[in-house]
Image: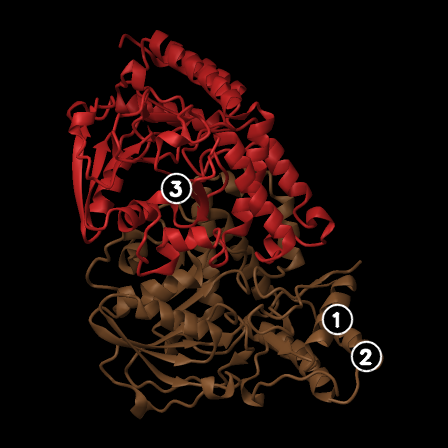
Chain colours: A brown, B red
């Protein structure tokens, strides 16, 4: 059976990447060692981590005044350590667009010495749009404005970035990094858990502008951006294998025509599914057209029991992890870069057949 | 060429483990997905992480009143968050046996609200032994006594644990977990980076006694032991693939006769190398006999240039990562559980040939 994996993360990886990793699993570059067995201080491993950084800089056009860090702990740890590093004794401004924004806000509020202010929220309409923010709303003394560029649970994304004046924009880009055309130079800091578009779980990417590195040491060396930057992510043993897989994924993205090539493919996939949803009398997606995510597409029938039936039959048909997040129910198709177009075609066919069988009027 | 990998970590993994992982790399348990692609909330992955915990509990005889956590950030992050979780407003006592103890001490000293006291050190003899500690040296109000059960750089290990009265013993067991016969119940907390005896880098094990979990929340959820225990290491996405490899390693350890079987093999390997060193007129190891590590065995010729020559020729002969740590020079053979006996035999032969060629009197 052909299986399509709609997981929100850890998610589907490019088949070519997995095949390459499998082929050299026991013997990397003639070393007779697995990449997992390489010392992180060896010259062979040094090439891997440097090439990963190099490819990322090329694909995202990251200028030299930004550091690229390969850290651990996921976006969830960044929720705490970004305010710890950047906002001591300052205000940190947040835009609330859904579940992940809320997690970032809640974590920041627990960091001592940081004053958190939510300057805009779309909670009034159940996070189905991105609120407008104008520069006069931004306290120019604030440490940063934080956004979540894509909400994986709500399926909401920014169509344009907020204007923040001189205040740096900090973005959780976990779910749509390498799948958007934002410029790195419009951000002060970008972070992303790898397990959606970058690679396997266990490595967290941080791209930080040089002038935003903390001047004072953080109480824990591992949480200190300046120290990590100085040590080029080798203060201690990094998650070596996860970084290696990320390197292979970045090579694959480059071969797909880079970020622009990926976006075109992602848009085609998303368009196909949104069209099917919008033409359907059974399925619907509540998000404002301009803010619809091309990455995570939630949809419902409007009837919880029918959603359950859909999920049950979808699983039998080989559609894995299509069930919506446990906090919202329904269905969700995560169409990350590695997700194949044919999988969306198959899903659309399945949805139409399901609607014919069970669908009434909306 | 046969390659023997003496890396101190990331280190050699059991060949059988790598072969199994390679075979099911693209299709785990008939799922048509790689383990890397599994959602951490899927039933398939749930089996993996539960089985990893189950095997570890069985192998180490971990009682039910201890939690097993799979975290991130390595031992280096634990150096900071153990005092943060366990010693707020209290004294934390440390025994200094070398480079890793010193790192743990230095990190603890930076944690606000914790008073660090070094109660014993072997610095007077360049960390070549483990200092004696008696219970009357232990302030019974202290949060814990911290030890490093094995120093990877100095090659020093505890032959018996210090008596601490009612004060819990906290141990960095990164380099000799599953290679010693200490009882878990003699510790309050054990932690270990995986990349020596447990698996690949990127996952950090914490075994913590229930009564030592923090009662007050820590400012960062990811650093909060009680929260991680409550969520069974699934507060956010864990390093799923690294945990899976750890599970395979634990299955392998069990098949080798468990921890006792491993120790016997480790002792045989270490004995062979120490005998060769002690019989040699060229090579020497400075560590007190009782405190010699069976895991990391440093040795020198006493002549830096000869050490360099040895390392150069050893590399050509297929002995990888035999060079001593950059802070001490010389040579170091790390003989973790997965390192084969034949590799030590080959090294001993090589050392004897080198001594015949270049060795004079010590």
Q: Is mark 2 on a helix, strand or loop?
A: helix
Q: Residue A238's spot in the image, x, y percent?
A: 41, 48
Label 1–label 2 contact, CB within 8 A? yes
Res. B208 mark:
3
Q: Which mark is residue A358?
A: 2
Mark 3 surroundings: few (<14), some (14-19) or many (≥20) residues within 10 A: many
Q: In which quarter of the image is residue A63?
A: bottom left
Residue at image location 52% in from the left, 19% down from the top: B341
Q: Is mark 3 on a helix, strand or loop?
A: strand
The residue nearer to you, when weighing A356 against A16, is: A356
Q: Is residue A64 among what the camera can see? A: no
Closer to the camera in the image, B117 or A256: B117
Res. A184 image quadrant: bottom left
Q: Where is residue B329 in the image (x, y as percent from the top left)?
A: 29, 29
Q: Do labels 3 and 2 share a chain?
A: no
Residue receiving disc 1: A309
Q: In this view, does B132 lie above or below A302?
A: above
In this rendering, position of residue B319 left or right of residue A116: right
Q: On screen, B255 above or below A102? A: above
Q: Image point 38% across, 79% down: which residue?
A: A186
- A313 vs B137, left or right, is right
């Amino acid at each position: 059976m052909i299986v399509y994996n709609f997981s929100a993360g850890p998610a589907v990886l490019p088949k070519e990447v997995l095949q390459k990793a499998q082929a050299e699993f026991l013997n990397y570059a003639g070393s007779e060692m697995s990449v997992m067995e390489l010392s992180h201080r060896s010259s062979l491993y040094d090439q891997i981590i440097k090439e990963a950084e190099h490819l990322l800089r090329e694909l995202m056009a990251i200028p030299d005044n930004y550091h690229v860090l390969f850290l651990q702990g996921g976006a969830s740890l960044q929720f705490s350590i970004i305010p710890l590093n950047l906002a001591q004794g300052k205000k940190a401004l947040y835009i609330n667009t859904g579940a992940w924004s809320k997690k970032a806000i809640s974590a920041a509020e627990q960091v001592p010495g940081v004053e958190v202010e939510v300057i805009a929220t779309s909670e009034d309409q159940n996070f189905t749009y991105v609120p407008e923010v104008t520069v006069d709303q931004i306290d120019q003394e604030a440490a940063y404005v934080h956004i979540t560029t894509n909400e994986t649970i709500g399926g909401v994304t920014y169509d344009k970035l907020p204007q923040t004046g001189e205040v740096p924009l900090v973005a959780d880009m976990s779910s749509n990094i390498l799948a958007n055309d934002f410029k790195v130079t419009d951000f002060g800091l970008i972070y992303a858990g790898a397990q959606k578009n970058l690679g396997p779980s266990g490595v967290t990417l941080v791209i930080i502008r040089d002038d935003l590195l903390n001047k004072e040491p953080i109480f824990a060396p591992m949480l200190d951006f300046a120290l990590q930057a100085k040590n080029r992510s080798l203060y201690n043993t990094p998650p070596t294998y996860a970084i290696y897989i990320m390197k292979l994924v970045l090579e694959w993205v480059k071969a797909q025509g880079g970020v622009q090539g990926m976006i075109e493919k992602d848009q085609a996939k998303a368009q196909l599914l949104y069209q099917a949803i919008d033409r359907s009398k059974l399925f619907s997606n509540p998000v404002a057209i301009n803010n619809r995510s091309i990455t995570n597409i939630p949809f419902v029938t409007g009837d919880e029991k029918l959603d359950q039936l859909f999920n049950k039959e979808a699983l039998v048909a080989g559609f894995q992890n299509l069930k919506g997040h446990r906090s919202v129910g329904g269905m969700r198709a995560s169409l990350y870069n590695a997700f194949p177009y044919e999988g969306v075609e198959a899903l659309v066919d399945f949805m139409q057949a399901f609607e014919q069988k069970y669908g009434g009027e909306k």
